Amino acid sequence: MADVGELKIGLAFDKGKFKASQDSVEKDTKSWGSKIGGLAMGAGKAVAAGAAAVAGAASAAVVKITKDAVASFAEYQQLVGGVETLFKDSADRVMDYAQKAYKTAGLSANQYMNTVTSFSASLLQGLGNDTKKAAEYGNRAVIDMADNANKMGTDISLIQNAYQGFAKQNYTMLDNLKLGYGGTKTEMERLLKDAEALTGKKYDVSNFADITEAIHVIQENMGIAGTTAKEAETTISGSLNMVKASWQNVLNAMADPDQDINKLLDELVNSFGTFAKNILPTITKTVGSIGKMIQHLAPVIGEELPKMIMEVG
């Protein structure tokens, strides 16, 4: 049993150890507190920097959208002026077709108006300046262009160039349509005769309106007509074109107080929904295929990899 002296010495010793331990804890606490405080300050700065970056990106996006909307609407105003000049009392009909073109032709209103006005003068001439008929013929021609591009895989700009050539009685780009006719006047006359055999109607090669109608007859007979609207509903590329065109229409409405932006936003949302519906099964199947590929390759890789490492070593 320890005597009183030993007890005093032990207590004094333990008290000294406790004091030293207490000092150490206080020191460590202050040190960790300083570190945690530093980390918190660093995290705070990082969060602030991240928030600033997000705000900067959002601001830049707003600036770009505003710039795009103003530029798009400026073009829109010019194109509307052209439509009104050419189609006069039937301009509203053309504008209605232009607003629906995102679905019927995969084109924005601007693209539609730009296309239809490029050959409208010749169309009106061939129809005796009947603006109502010209609006109908023009709409059908633009949809035929889009259908041809979607079905035959030709860039639509090449088809637009071909139609503009036909309006000037230049048939060298007829083969751009890939309908089985060469780029000559004789071949265009053959196309008109083939259309006549299908409809019983006589077509005049010097009349641009007749040419557009004959091309429609041939494309309808070949199963090309109507493919753009169908692909907009059922294919990835078709629905993506619809999304792009409807977004362009929304940009116009952002800067135009006379347009119904809510309606155009609904069209954009519906277009995106169609696109998502078309693309999601493909993504799901692709991911599943990748999983199956890895599953089949894993045993082979597991067997061959050690050999490869040994050979390299």
Image (spheres, rainbow, N blue to C red):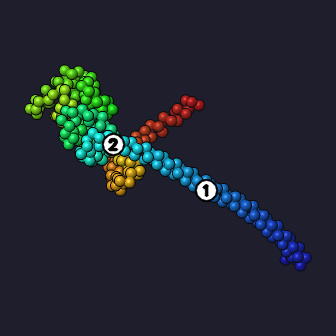
Q: Quadrant of residue 74?
A: top left
Q: Quadrant of residue 188?
A: top left
Residue sitting at 43 percent across and 38 percent down?
297
* Distance from the alpha carbon under mark 1 to that under mark 2: 49 Å
Front residue of this view, candidates 51 and 305:
51
- Residue 103, label in figure: none
Position of residue 260 relative to residue 231, above or below, is below
**Residue 39: image location, x then y, percent:** 67, 57
Residue 153: x and y in percent read 30, 33
Q: Nearer the viewer, residue 202 or 31?
A: 202
| Residue 2 figure quarter | bottom right
Closer to us: 19 or 185: 185
Decide which of tag 1 and tag 2 comes sooner along the chain. 1
Tag 2 residue: 81
Q: Can residue 276 be seen?
A: no
Q: Is residue 253 visible?
A: yes
Considering only vertical position in the picture, is 221 above or below 92? Answer: above
Residue type (three-letter) at the residue carrying disc 1:
Ala
Task: State the SS at label 1.
Answer: helix
**Kind of residue at disc 2:** Gly
The mark found on residue 48 in the picture is 1
Circles 1 and 2 in contact, beta carbons < 8 Å: no
The residue depicted at 45 percent of the width and 40 percent of the height is 298
In the rendered image, the quadrant that contains the N terminus is bottom right
- Image location (x, y in percent) of residue 40: 66, 60
